[in-house]
Image (cartoon, rainbow, N blue to C red):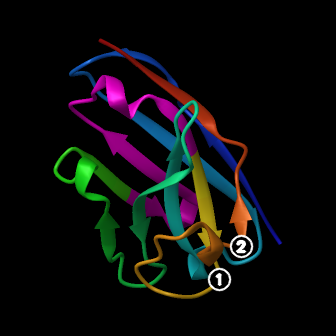
């Protein structure tokens, strides 16, 4: 069992930066692939970024490539999402998720555990 808690969300102006975090408790965080998803009001939850458990392989949805960076610190049981050049359309609740296996996981069903989400609001 893995429990995930996101933090670091808030209000930021367009063009600004924000780093959100997800800290895990439970077993063997370092063996889980991690992902970030987001859900804007009235929209479905969508994939944002992925990082593998072993090599640190990353993958991003096209709309955030070059602006967002996912990373992890296994010693701290934490995965991060650094968000730069934020746009109004990045406004959403951001969720982290953990997967027991697999690579380049972009679907909700690929993940076994979810956090409660953190709100990111970008003012235009």
Query: Label 1 belongs to which residue?
Result: 100
Near-viewer residue (78 or 38): 38
Task: Report the Cα–Cα distance between label 2 and label 1.
Answer: 7 Å
Q: Quadrant of residue 113?
A: bottom right
Tell me where the magenta segment starts and ends, as one range.
71-94
| Residue at 27% in and 29% down | 86
Residue 93 is covered by the magenta coloring = yes
Is there a contact, CB below 8 Å, between mark 2 and mark 1?
yes
Q: In which quarter of the image is residue 24?
A: bottom right
| Residue at 36% in and 83% down | 55
Residue 45 is covered by the magenta coloring = no
Element at label 2: loop
Relative image position of residue 65 (x, y in whole percent): 21, 54
Query: Label 2 belongs to which residue?
Result: 112
Relative image position of residue 70 (x, y in whole percent): 37, 56
| Residue at 61% in and 34% down | 118
Q: Residues within 10 Å of mark 2 (few under 14, many from 20)?
A: some
Element at label 1: loop
């Amino acid at each position: 069992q893995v429990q995930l808690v996101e933090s670091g969300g808030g209000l930021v102006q367009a063009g600004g930066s924000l780093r959100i975090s997800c800290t895990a408790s439970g077993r063997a965080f370092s063996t889980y692939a991690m992902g970030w998803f987001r859900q804007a009001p009235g929209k479905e939850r969508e994939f944002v970024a992925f990082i593998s458990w072993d090599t640190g392989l990353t993958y991003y949805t096209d709309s955030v490539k070059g602006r967002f960076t996912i990373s992890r610190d296994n010693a701290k049981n934490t995965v991060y999402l650094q968000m730069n050049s934020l746009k109004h359309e990045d406004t959403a609740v951001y969720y982290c998720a953990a997967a027991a296996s697999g690579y380049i996981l972009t679907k909700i069903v690929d993940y076994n555990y979810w956090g409660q989400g953190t709100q990111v609001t970008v003012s235009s």
